[in-house]
Structures are given as C-alpha cells and as structure tokens.
Image (cartoon, rainbow, N blue to C red):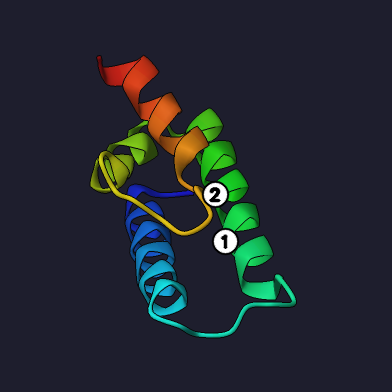
Amino acid sequence: MSEQASVLLVGLLIRLDKKICKGVDDSDGIVGGFMREVAEVLLNFVKFNPDCAKSFVKLCGLKTCFEWQKSLVEYFDNQYS
C-alpha cells in the first residue's frame, strides 16, 4: 500500500478507460467491474497510507466511460480542497 503502487493502479485505470472508450467490447461488464473494484482497493490504500491519495489528482476533471473515478475524486477533493 505504497504511493508508487497507487500511481501504477491509477495509470492502469486511465489506460483501460481509454481502451474501453475507443471501442473495446465490455458488454459483459468484466473490465468495468474490475475497474470499479480497483477504485475500491485504492480507497482502502488511503486508509493505511493517506499519501496514496496524491495519485488521485490525475483523475480530477477526467471524463470516463463508467465514472469509476468518482469516489476517488470525491475523496481527493475532501482531503485537499
């Protein structure tokens, strides 16, 4: 639960979202579900290491296909606004 791991996971989510938005088929919802679960894992990271939330800044203002980033942005806004 390090800041480095958080940065990697946020980057992964952003790349996956770009793929899905450009037409990768996720009609069965597997990738979208995975993305939401990773977002939940990131929220658990900040319980043990609050510095992990700094990686959420990349998500602020980002438009996504499934709004999986919403809880992370809300957390970031509450901590740093």
Q: Residue at x 34, y 48 (%)?
A: 3
Q: Out of 50 and 32, give the one closest to the viewer.
A: 32
Measuring 70% from the left and 70% from the top, which residue is drawn there? 29
- Residue 41 picture location, percent across and down: 60, 49
Q: Give the residue type that dot 1 points to.
A: Met
Q: Report the residue at 62% width, 73% height from top.
A: 31
Instruction: Tell me whether the residue at label 2 lies in contact with that at label 1, contact meaning CB atoms closer than 8 angstroms.
Output: yes
Determine whether 30 is above or below 46 in the image: below
**In the image, farthest residue toward the bottom:** 24
In this rendering, position of residue 17 left or right of residue 55: right
Q: Vertical placement of 58 versus 26: above or below?
A: above
Sort mark 1 into few (<14), some (14-19) or many (20+) by Cα contacts within 10 Å.
Answer: many
Indicate the position of residue 18 as horizontal and vertical percent values.
36, 72
Measure the alpha-carbon separation of dots 2 and 1.
6 Å
The residue under label 2 is: 39
Instruction: Give me the residue at 61% from left, 65% from top.
Output: 32
| Residue 64 sits in quarter | bottom left
Q: Determine which quarter of the picture holds residue 53.
A: top left
Give the residue number, with chain letter if any, for mark 1: 35
SS class of the residue under badge 1? helix
State the image coordinates of residue 16 (x, y, percent, origin top left).
44, 73
Q: Does residue 15 lie above or below 58 as drawn?
A: below
Amino acid of disc 2: Ala
Q: Secondary structure at mark 2?
A: helix
In percent of width and height, residue 33 lies at: 68, 62
Quarter of the picture containing the C terminus is top left
- Tell me if mark 2 has few (under 14), some (14-19) or many (20+) residues whose alpha carbon lies within 10 angstroms of its own: many
